[in-house]
């Protein structure tokens, strides 16, 4: 079982184990050694979001990689999918992203992509963990104050932007007004450069990072913010990203949030009409609303559910040769275009769909009738198997029994934070709230901080 890597890399408070200097240096050594096994002079491309801890983490990680024989090049502040693209297309042995995605600014993280642009397999991460622990106990990490991150090569960002523009050739936004919330994160410069040549009126918000305001009351973590601004600006569509911009959520002209379920519905129907939806199949997760499944079924599209985490969605997609998958949170996977979720790419795909059909997004997903759903996050001191705790297990079984035909119960631990997530979905809102509170209270009583 992995203890460092979660569902999306290594993530923690910056400066505190496992994201302290000795561990970060050991990660660089372990990755460099792993890559050196298949190449005598491996090249690694590095990118980061806007957190103030990014530069010293980059410098420390680079020191470890170089000590292990790797050469490191930097793309600077770019999105996670930009690094995946660069790793795959520019001959790098790996791509590394320093980001904690939607987490607050105090956190940071390390995500690793292989030369193929895909996230590392769980078994590879497990093997790397053993090396990291070895180097952490045997190697002496340098003082990060004496280190510098590699110089930024601006051509990397330009190459990535050129790729994005090719994904929606001929897209013209003339006559449209759009609001784009950059979350004070990795997309803040790229988004402005991406949309500038497309015409129309684009209003950018939360595009002034300070190192400490990433995701703060903005971005995909707070989609109602862009929804309200879209309505206030009388704009036709709102777009919002998370801190590293591998996710995208939308808002319609009426100020309603359109989450990943709505995006999957719009994209799947469009792909199906163009004969590009293989086997009439979409892969979602256990968190996707039952309403999505029902709307897809009416169109003759099947939906499979994968565990939460875009890498697990991708595994199911590859197993079933699916052309589309994603998460309610806004990770949308389009393997014919990219190897990982890409918020900027998702935005272009939907804008292109709107331009081709002449229909606003609220019309394109008007029949998505969302079942009442609530997600309660409970902070926990440890992640014990929930079925081993009688009080918690009893509360879960009671909910499952009552909602067996009219709802769903999904209880899981976060792979990136010390949280238990309680998701209840039901036709009856009263039943939904009753059972979510009962389960959450049971977890708090037994495992709460």
Image: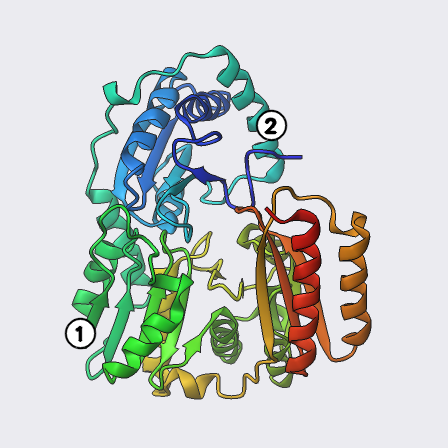
Of residue 45 and residue 290, the one placed in the foreground of this image is: 290
Say which residue appears at 40% left-offset and 57% top-offset: 342
Q: State the image coordinates of residue 376 (x, y, percent, origin top left).
A: 58, 63
SS label for mark 2 = helix
Of residue 291 and residue 325, the one placed in the foreground of this image is: 291
Q: State the image coordinates of residue 272 (x, y, percent, origin top left).
A: 53, 77
Q: State the image coordinates of residue 280 (x, y, percent, origin top left).
A: 61, 73
| Crowding at mark 2 (Cα within 10 Å: few <14, some 14-19, many 20+) | few
Residue on which the image places disc 1: 199
Which comes before the other along the chain, label 1 or label 2? Answer: 2
Q: How is the image coloured?
A: rainbow
Quadrant assignment, res 87: top left
| Crowding at mark 1 (Cα within 10 Å: few <14, some 14-19, many 20+) | some
Say which residue appears at 29% left-offset and 78% top-offset: 230
Instruction: Using the rendered image of the protein, determine whether residue 380 is visible from the camera's viewpoint.
Output: yes
Quadrant assignment, res 317: bottom right
Q: Is residue 367 above or below residue 381?
A: below
Residue on which the image places disc 2: 127
Say which residue appears at 17% left-offset and 67% top-offset: 197
Tell me: 203 left or right of 119.
Answer: left
Q: Is residue 312 above or below residue 292?
A: above
Q: State the CA–CA distance, disc 1 to disc 2.
A: 49 Å
Instruction: Using the rendered image of the protein, determine whether residue 113 is visible from the camera's viewpoint.
Output: no
Q: State the image coordinates of residue 414 (x, y, percent, origin top left).
A: 58, 51
Of residue 57 and residue 32, the one placed in the foreground of this image is: 57
């Amino acid at each position: 079982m992995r203890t460092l890597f979660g569902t999306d890399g290594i993530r923690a408070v910056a400066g505190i184990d496992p994201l302290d200097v000795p561990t970060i240096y050991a990660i660089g050594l372990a990755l460099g050694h792993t890559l050196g096994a298949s190449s005598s002079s491996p090249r690694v491309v590095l990118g980061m979001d806007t957190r103030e801890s990014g530069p010293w983490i980059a410098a420390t990680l680079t020191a470890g990689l170089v000590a292990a024989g790797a050469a490191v090049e930097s793309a600077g502040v770019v999105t996670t999918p930009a690094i995946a693209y660069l790793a795959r297309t520019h001959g790098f042995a790996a791509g590394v992203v320093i980001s904690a995605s939607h987490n607050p600014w105090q956190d940071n993280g390390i995500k690793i992509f292989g030369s193929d642009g895909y996230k590392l397999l769980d078994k590879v991460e497990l093997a790397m963990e053993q090396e990291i622990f070895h180097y952490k106990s045997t190697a002496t990490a340098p003082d990060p104050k004496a280190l510098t991150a590699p110089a930024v090569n601006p051509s990397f960002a330009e190459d990535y932007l050129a790729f994005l523009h090719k994904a929606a050739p001929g897209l013209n936004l003339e006559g449209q007004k759009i609001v784009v919330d950059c979350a004070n994160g990795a997309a803040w410069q790229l988004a402005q450069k991406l949309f500038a040549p497309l015409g129309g009126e684009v209003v950018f918000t939360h595009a002034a990072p300070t190192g400490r305001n990433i995701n703060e009351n903005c971005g995909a973590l707070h989609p109602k913010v862009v929804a309200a601004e879209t309505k206030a600006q009388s704009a036709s569509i709102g777009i919002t990203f998370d801190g590293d911009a591998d996710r995208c959520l939308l808002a319609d002209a009426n100020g309603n949030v359109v989450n990943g379920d709505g995006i999957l519905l719009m994209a799947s129907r469009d792909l199906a009409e163009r004969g590009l939806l293989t086997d009439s199949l979409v892969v979602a997760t256990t968190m996707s609303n039952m309403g999505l499944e029902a709307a897809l079924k009416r169109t003759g599209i099947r939906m499979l559910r994968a565990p939460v985490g875009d890498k697990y969605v991708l595994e199911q997609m590859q197993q079933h040769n699916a052309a589309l998958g994603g998460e309610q949170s806004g990770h949308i996977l389009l393997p014919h275009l990219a190897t990982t979720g890409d918020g900027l790419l998702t935005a272009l795909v939907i804008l292109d769909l709107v331009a081709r059909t002449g229909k606003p997004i609220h019309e394109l997903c008007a029949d998505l009738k969302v079942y009442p759903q609530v997600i309660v996050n409970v902070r926990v001191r440890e992640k014990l198997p929930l079925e081993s705790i009688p009080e918690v297990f009893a509360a879960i079984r009671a909910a499952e029994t009552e909602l067996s035909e009219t709802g769903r119960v999904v209880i899981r631990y976060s792979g990136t934070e010390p949280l238990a997530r309680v998701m209840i979905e039901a036709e009856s809102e009263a039943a939904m709230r009753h059972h979510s509170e009962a389960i959450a209270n049971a977890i708090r009583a037994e495992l709460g901080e």
